Image (cartoon, helix red, strand yellow):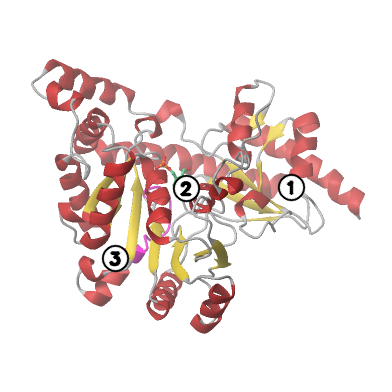
């Protein structure tokens, strides 16, 4: 057997199989009620609309362009549509501020590549999106804790980054219905992140993957909009907004976007030329057609279903969880974040749950850059119907009650 480890680059040493990806395999087992995968419900995909869009492309003159190489910036009509969407969010942007990626995951990889030299520091929330940690890990950074509720002093961040051998480069966060917590950062928290970024002179990466999925409460302006309100112009902004069609239209087409200052977009375009030339032309065209014709209706349809499921899950948690267990009350997104009594281990609980309760979820530790959070877990309600929620949360509640009683 050939030993590869000494041949692989050092950056590969932090690449490990994702707990979530492994768990997704469980979705196929019919005896398991799964709250594990944070994926959209396929029943809600606008498949008829996509079928019509692709048929039109193949039946018309656009087919040659659709099957041909294209520009790295992305399909221009889609960028024009997105510029209007961004304007509606308080972000005046031109097509030159929009760059199409193969899912927003690719944007996270590119931004890691663009900003992080080995030993530089990325500020992330504890917990944060696991896929962001995976994307950034390849660039060998250190992590420090971003806390929109009240950060340490800029000097403290600077010093810790210097001790780690580099400097702070960006703050990454999901301000709306974060994966994994489902929580939203309030306006004051967003302003605090901007203040910190100004003082540290670093970028802000705003992951807006779930932003369109608000079911109740007042929308809060994106961080990029708040920064433009301060500075008057997107090209003076340090915030880099990453959007995605995965949660609204369909993830399988792999279309996301970045909205940012032209200086950042130009660099990202060069990276794309080197990495994959451009995102799938035909998929961008289809997304553009479907979005132009009925994005708002599609989002409204998703809201109705997910809002109901969110509320059903919160009600079931209230009914079945024993004392000492707490959870977030998300106003949108796909996730509820559960905190178990100290001393309970989410990963051990999952192993038992698969055996006995036959309920799957994601143990929280993987979402913490410092490896803490063992007494937490993530539940996704996006693919669960009423019966699964009632039955699954009841079984999970019983299991946790037994564990807590045993530990006491
Ligand atoms: C917070 C967050 N950001 C980004 C992504 C990546 O999504 P995509 O690459 O499909 O746009 C996800 C996917 O689950 C996510 O939860």
- Residue 363 percent coordinates (x, y): 68, 46
The tag earlier along the polypeptide, 1 or 3, is 3
- Residue 165 percent coordinates (x, y): 55, 71
Q: Are marks 3 and 2 in contact (CB under 8 Å)?
A: no
Quarter of the figure with the N terminus: top right
Please give the name of the residue rendered at 46% of the width and 35% of the height, measured from the top-left corner: 40
Our reading of the magenta stretch's main secondary structure is loop
Q: Which residues are magenta?
A: 212-224
For label 1, the residue is 346
- Residue 378 percent coordinates (x, y): 62, 47
Residue at disc 2, secondary structure: loop
Is 310 magenta? The answer is no
The tag earlier along the polypeptide, 1 or 2, is 2
- Residue 355 percent coordinates (x, y): 79, 30
Q: Is residue 283 left or right of residue 364?
A: left
For label 2, the residue is 333
Q: Is residue 388 left or right of residue 279?
A: right
The residues tagged by marks 3 and 2 sit, at their Cα atoms, a distance apart of 20 Å
Label 3: how many Cα within 10 Å (few below 14, some 14–19, many 20+): many
For label 3, the residue is 225
Residue at disc 3, secondary structure: helix
Is 219 magenta? The answer is yes
């Amino acid at each position: 057997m050939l030993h590869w480890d000494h041949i692989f680059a050092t950056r590969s040493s932090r690449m490990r199989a994702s707990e979530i990806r492994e768990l997704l395999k469980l979705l196929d087992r019919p005896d398991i009620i799964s709250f594990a995968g944070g994926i959209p419900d396929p029943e809600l995909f606008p498949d008829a609309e996509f079928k019509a869009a692709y048929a039109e492309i193949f039946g018309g003159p656009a087919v040659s362009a659709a099957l041909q190489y294209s520009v790295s910036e992305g399909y221009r009509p889609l960028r024009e549509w997105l510029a209007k969407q961004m304007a509606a969010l308080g972000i005046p942007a031109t097509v030159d501020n929009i760059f199409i990626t193969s899912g927003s995951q690719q944007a996270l990889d590119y931004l890691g590549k663009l900003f992080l030299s080995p030993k530089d520091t990325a500020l992330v929330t504890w917990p944060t999106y696991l896929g962001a940690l995976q994307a950034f890990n390849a660039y060998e950074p250190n992590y420090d804790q971003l806390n929109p509720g009240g950060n340490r002093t800029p000097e403290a961040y600077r010093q810790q980054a210097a001790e780690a051998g580099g400097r702070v480069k960006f703050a990454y966060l999901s301000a709306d219905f974060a994966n994994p917590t489902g929580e939203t950062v309030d306006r004051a928290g967003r302003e605090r992140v901007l203040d910190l970024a100004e003082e540290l002179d670093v970028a802000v990466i705003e992951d807006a993957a779930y932003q369109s999925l608000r079911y109740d409460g007042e929308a809060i302006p994106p961080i990029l909009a708040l920064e433009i309100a301060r500075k008057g112009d997107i090209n003076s902004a340090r915030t880099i907004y990453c959007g995605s069609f995965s949660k609204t239209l369909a993830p399988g087409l792999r279309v996301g976007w970045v909205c940012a200052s032209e200086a950042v977009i130009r660099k990202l375009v060069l990276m794309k030329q080197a990495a994959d030339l451009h995102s799938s032309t035909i998929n961008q065209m289809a997304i553009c057609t479907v979005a132009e014709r009925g994005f708002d209706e599609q989002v409204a349809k998703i809201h109705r279903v997910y809002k109901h499921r969110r509320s059903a899950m919160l009600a079931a948690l209230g009914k079945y969880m024993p004392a000492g267990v707490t959870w977030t009350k998300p106003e949108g997104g796909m996730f509820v974040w559960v905190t178990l009594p100290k001393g309970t281990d989410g990963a051990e609980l999952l192993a038992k749950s698969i055996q006995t309760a036959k309920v799957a979820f994601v143990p929280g530790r993987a979402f913490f850059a410092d490896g803490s959070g063992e007494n937490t877990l993530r539940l996704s309600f996006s693919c669960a119907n009423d019966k699964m929620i009632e039955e699954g949360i009841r079984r999970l509640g019983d299991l946790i009650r037994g564990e807590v009683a045993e530990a006491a």
